């Protein structure tokens, strides 16, 4: 059972999300928060698997709440907002969010997103991905490989770059002529070696370290 906490300052929005999610097999809404501080408190109290977090809330906002939750637990956070602005996306991922969806997402996509993030994968709405990569490039003018990449083998660096390009484990396996299980093992080992919590954080590290740049996959 995937346990979900809803964090949004609008009662009707929370009711809508609860109606969608509680009707699904294997998903249960275990709490509701009206602001960021309550979201942090309830996360510690009810230990959800996934938090659906609004960004703009009174008091402690969604980004600050996400940062606190990510720093103190392995709970996954999906940011939900009316806006798909780059600053929000970048800030949410930097804060430790595992997913980002706009509020006009279809119910089926919301359910899929909860399941994807609960199993440890990253989720970013397709409409956001292209501008997100451009945002990384603009902000990271001087990439720094840092010590975390030094432990990776050449094959692991290749796999990490493909993760950053948005490929799934199956797609990575096909491109590198590996089995899907081997590709999944590579990704897990990379996350362990680089000390990141999920694929979203791995993407950030790949761009900030200079391991990959926008458009390289299309040119290769």
Image (cartoon, rainbow, N blue to C red):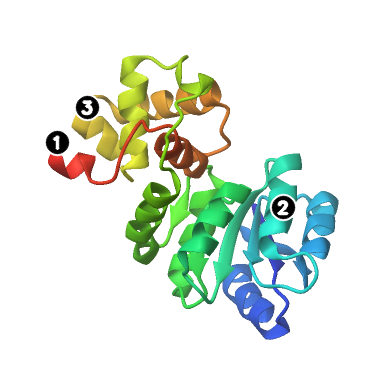
Residue drawn at (54%, 58%) of the image: 114
Cβ–Cβ under 8 Å for marks 2 and 3: no
Look at the image and tell me whether residue 50 can be seen: yes
In-front residue for pair 211/166? 211
Q: Nearer the viewer, mark 2 or mark 1?
A: 1
Look at the image and tell me whether residue 169 can be seen: no
Label 3: which residue?
Answer: 176
Residue drawn at (78%, 64%) of the image: 60
Q: Nearer the viewer, mark 2 or mark 3?
A: 3
* Secondary structure of the residue carrying numbered label 1: loop
Q: Please tell me how crowded label 1 is: few (under 14), some (14-19), or many (20+) other residues with Cα within 10 Å.
A: few
In-front residue for pair 138/30? 138
Residue 61 in picture, x, y percent from top left: 72, 65
Residue 99 in picture, x, y percent from top left: 52, 55
Cβ–Cβ under 8 Å for marks 3 and 1: no
| Number of numbered markers | 3
Which quadrant of the rendered structure holds the C terminus? Answer: top left
Q: Please tell me how crowded label 3 is: few (under 14), some (14-19), or many (20+) other residues with Cα within 10 Å.
A: few
Horizontally, is 120 left or right of 174 in the view?
right
In the picture, the disc for residue 220 is: 1
* Secondary structure of the residue carrying numbered label 2: loop
Q: Please tell me how crowded label 2 is: few (under 14), some (14-19), or many (20+) other residues with Cα within 10 Å.
A: many
The image shows residue 132, relative to residue 33, as above or below, that is: above
In the picture, the disc for residue 48 is: 2
In the picture, the disc for residue 155 is: none
* Secondary structure of the residue carrying numbered label 3: helix
In-front residue for pair 143/168? 143
């Amino acid at each position: 059972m995937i346990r979900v906490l809803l964090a949004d300052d609008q009662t009707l929005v929370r009711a809508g999300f609860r109606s969608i999610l509680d009707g699904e097999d294997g998903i249960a809404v275990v709490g509701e928060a009206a602001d960021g501080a309550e979201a942090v408190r309830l996360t510690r109290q009810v230990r959800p698997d996934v938090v659906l977090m609004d960004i703009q809330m009174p008091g402690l906002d969604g980004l600050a709440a996400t940062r606190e939750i990510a720093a103190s637990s392995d709970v996954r956070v999906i940011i939900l907002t009316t806006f798909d602005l780059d600053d929000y996306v970048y800030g949410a991922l930097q804060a430790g969010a595992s997913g980002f969806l706009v509020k006009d997402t279809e119910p089926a996509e919301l359910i899929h997103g909860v399941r994807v993030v609960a199993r440890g994968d990253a989720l970013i709405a397709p409409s956001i991905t292209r501008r997100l990569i451009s945002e990384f490039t603009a902000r990271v003018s001087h990439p720094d490989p840092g010590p975390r990449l030094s432990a990776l083998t050449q094959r692991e660096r290749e796999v990490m770059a493909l993760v950053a390009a948005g490929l799934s484990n199956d797609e990575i396996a096909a491109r590198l002529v590996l089995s899907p299980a081997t590709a999944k093992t590579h990704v897990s080992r990379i996350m362990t070696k680089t000390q990141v919590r999920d694929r979203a954080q791995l993407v950030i590290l790949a761009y900030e370290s200079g391991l990959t740049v926008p458009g390289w996959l299309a040119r290769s």
